[in-house]
Amino acid sequence: MKLTIKVDPDLCIGAASCVTIAPDTFELNNENKAEVLDHGQAPDGPQYERTVEVTEEEKEIMIMAAQSCPTLAILIFDESGHQLYPEV
């Protein structure tokens, strides 16, 4: 399955809880903002949105990482564009 992961850099405060939970998906950049990785592969320049192929287990980890964000800066969408987190 594919998920689209978005980080709002204006909301991100660099708490790095997402990096701790999902280090293959998130890393902090030079501005202390979370960026989205593709299975550990760093993006070219700031990448605040990425669509990645994931397993069910990886999906759960990404949602836990998003839930750990104190500012709700991480949004996760399924293949049909339905927002999985935060729930609307």
Image (cartoon, rainbow, N blue to C red):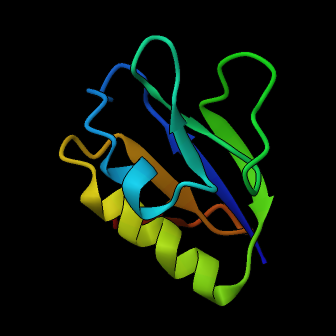
Relative to residue 57, is residue 52 depicted above or below? above
- Please report the residue visible at 51 percent of the width from the left and 66 percent of the height from the top: 62
Q: Work out which residue is located at the far bottom of the displayed protein and give it.
A: 56
The reply, left or right, for residue 26 in relation to residue 1 is: left
Kindly tell me whether residue 86 is visible in this rendering: no
Seen from this angle, which residue lies furthest top?
31
- Rendering coords of residue 63 (x, y %): 44, 69
Q: Position of residue 68 (x, y in %)?
A: 26, 59
- Quadrant of the image occupied by residue 49: top right
Placement of the C terminus among the 4 image quadrants: bottom left
User: Residue at 21% across / 40% down in the picture?
Assistant: 71
Q: Quadrant of the N terminus?
A: bottom right
Q: Is residue 82 left or right of residue 63?
A: right
Q: Is residue 86 above or below residue 49?
A: below
Can you see residue 61? Answer: yes
Please give the name of the residue rendered at 35% of the width and 19% of the height, measured from the top-left corner.
Answer: 10
Q: Position of residue 33 (x, y in %)?
A: 43, 24
Q: Which residue does the image show at 72% across and 83% down from the upper left? A: 55
Number of numbered discs present? 0
